[in-house]
Image (cartoon, rainbow, N blue to C red):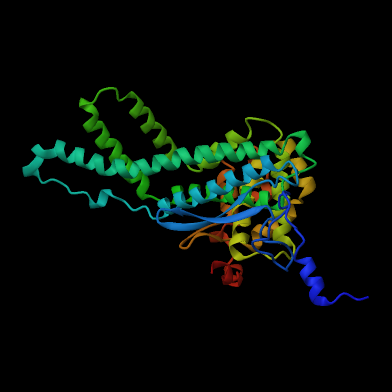
Amino acid sequence: MAVPVEEAIAALSTFSLEDDQPEVQGPAVWISTERGATQSPIGIIYSTEVLGRFFPIAEYSDVSAYRLSLSEDTKALNQLNSLIQEGKEMASVLYTYRSCVKALPQLPDSMKQSQADLYLETYQVLDLEMSRLREIQRWQASAASKLAADMQRFSRPERRINGPTITHLWSMLKLLDVLVQLDHLKNAKASIPNDFSWYKRTFTQVSVQWQDIDSMREELDDLQIFLSTRWAILLNLHVEMFRVNNVEDILQVLIVFAVESLELDFALLFPERHILLRVLPVLVVLATSSEKDSESLYKRVKIIRLINIFKNDPVIPAFPDLHLSPAAILKELSTYFHKFSTQTRLLTLPAPHELPPREAQEYPLIFFV
């Protein structure tokens, strides 16, 4: 005998479906139906406020029900993403930096007796700006150390089989891109060394009557080396990376990922494409730190593929009104990395000002947008 529908529904409503089991996986934040998911299923998106502005940050955590041993990877991802957001703020500080010296008053000859007071006021004004540069110096050292440690973690024998995920590769590339941008901005800002020279001069004048200034002088010397050395951030990253051997494998993985992403029909937005183009020459220089490493790299990535990529994009944006050239980066870094200076085929790539007029006219202007 058939049970009426109303009675069946009433009977089902008496069943208890509650239990103490944890949810295996919650609803996804954002699912893309294209070639890949844009958010990891273990990622949670939240906003953080930095200097009055809100930035979305993906925070990753392992799901207890899975027991996939992802706690180490998710912790590293969260750390890298936090460093990326902090680095973008540091880049904004450098990009918006303007010279303070031009706005400082100059005393006429009739007021030379107040020169000491002027030096003190000038020092206090410049010290505020230099404190921001010192913060950038400390941050880049910490970021380089953490990025190098993360790369070295994937160079362990047990991690070579289960390598980094696509999300992890992008996080490492984005942090490296932030470091490249900071270095480029530091090199491009002529106002920074000009302000620092005035700052050091006023420090010499006002510190005569101070006590225990040895530590301040040492900090001042370190800042001077940092500001006056071109590509100081990348040189520091190289030192941090090669404190432990066997980082060449992860560098080659990053290079292969960048080359294949640029060559194949991947759905890359222009910001993502520019990230890969900015970091690729740096990765190539770091990965060819010795003749053995360069031979291993060029077995996996033919040098003609790199040449074609750099020829197709001779100029890429670093910031809205600042651009850089992969070929120029390779040539300039070759003076600091002597092993790379033997890579003549890459070093013969023409810089933007060396392009023939016809090629310069045919270069697609869409890449500047």
Q: How many numbered markers are drawn?
A: 0
Relative horizontal placement of residue 126, taking residue 176 as reference (left or right): left
Front in this rendered view, residue 171 or 182 = 171
Q: Residue at 71% x, 59% y: name it.
A: 261
Front in this rendered view, residue 215 or 23 = 23
Q: Residue at 55% x, 56% y: name it.
A: 46
Front in this rendered view, residue 215 or 203 = 215
x and y, in percent, of residue 89 in the image: 45, 51
Spot the residue most to the left. Answer: 110
Relative horizontal placement of residue 130, taking residue 286 as reference (left or right): left
x and y, in percent, of residue 54 in the image: 47, 58
Spot the residue most to the right. Answer: 1
Q: Residue at 75% x, 43% y: name it.
A: 67
x and y, in percent, of residue 182 in the image: 49, 48
Relative horizontal placement of residue 98, taking residue 233 as reference (left or right): left
Q: Is residue 176 above or below residue 30?
A: above
Q: Residue at 20% x, 38% y: name it.
A: 120
Where is the N terminus found, in terms of image quarters? bottom right
x and y, in percent, of residue 6 in the image: 79, 76
Where is the C terminus found, in terms of image quarters? bottom right
Q: Is residue 16 visible?
A: yes
Q: Is residue 342 visible?
A: no
Relative horizontal placement of residue 353, taking residue 18 as reference (left or right): left
Front in this rendered view, residue 198 or 16 = 16
